């Protein structure tokens, strides 16, 4: 387990370094709340099966989209 976590930390650091070199602000963060598959489907309307890692990544993207107002636009499009 510790070996996998070490690899994840190294990959995270490499990605953050590349983003910094490209002038793209980024930071590492851990998932705040774990969702089971049903809660993830209700929240995101994602129709396919997901593993925990995919749900964690999806919720990070969902949070970014919500912050940027993308979700408001998508909701409006769904209502029409």
Image (cartoon, helix red, strand yellow):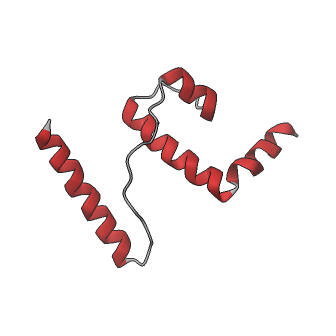
Residue 42 relative to residue 13: left or right: right
Find residue 15 and report its image quarter.
Answer: bottom left
Q: Position of residue 46 (x, y in %)?
A: 58, 32
Q: Position of residue 7 (x, y in %)?
A: 17, 49
Residue 20 relative to residue 68: left or right: left
Q: Position of residue 35 (x, y in %)?
A: 48, 29
How many numbered dots are placed on residues in this image? Answer: 0
Residue closest to the far front = 32
Residue 68 relative to residue 8: left or right: right
Residue closest to the far top = 38
Residue found at x 54% / y 29%? 40
Name the image quarter holding the C terminus. Answer: top right
Height in image: 43 above or below 73?
above
Q: Position of residue 12 (x, y in %)?
A: 28, 57
Residue found at x 26% / y 62%? 13
Residue found at x 19% / y 44%? 5
Residue closest to the far left = 3
Residue found at x 20% / y 57%? 10
Name the image quarter holding the N terminus. Answer: top left
């Amino acid at each position: 387990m510790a070996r996998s976590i070490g690899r994840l930390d190294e990959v995270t650091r490499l990605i953050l370094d590349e983003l910094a070199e490209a002038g793209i602000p980024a930071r590492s963060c851990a998932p705040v709340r774990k969702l089971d598959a049903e809660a993830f489907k209700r929240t995101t309307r994602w129709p396919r099966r997901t593993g925990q890692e995919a749900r964690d990544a999806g919720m990070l993207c969902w949070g970014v989209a919500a912050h940027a107002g993308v979700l408001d636009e998508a909701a409006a499009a769904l209502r029409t």
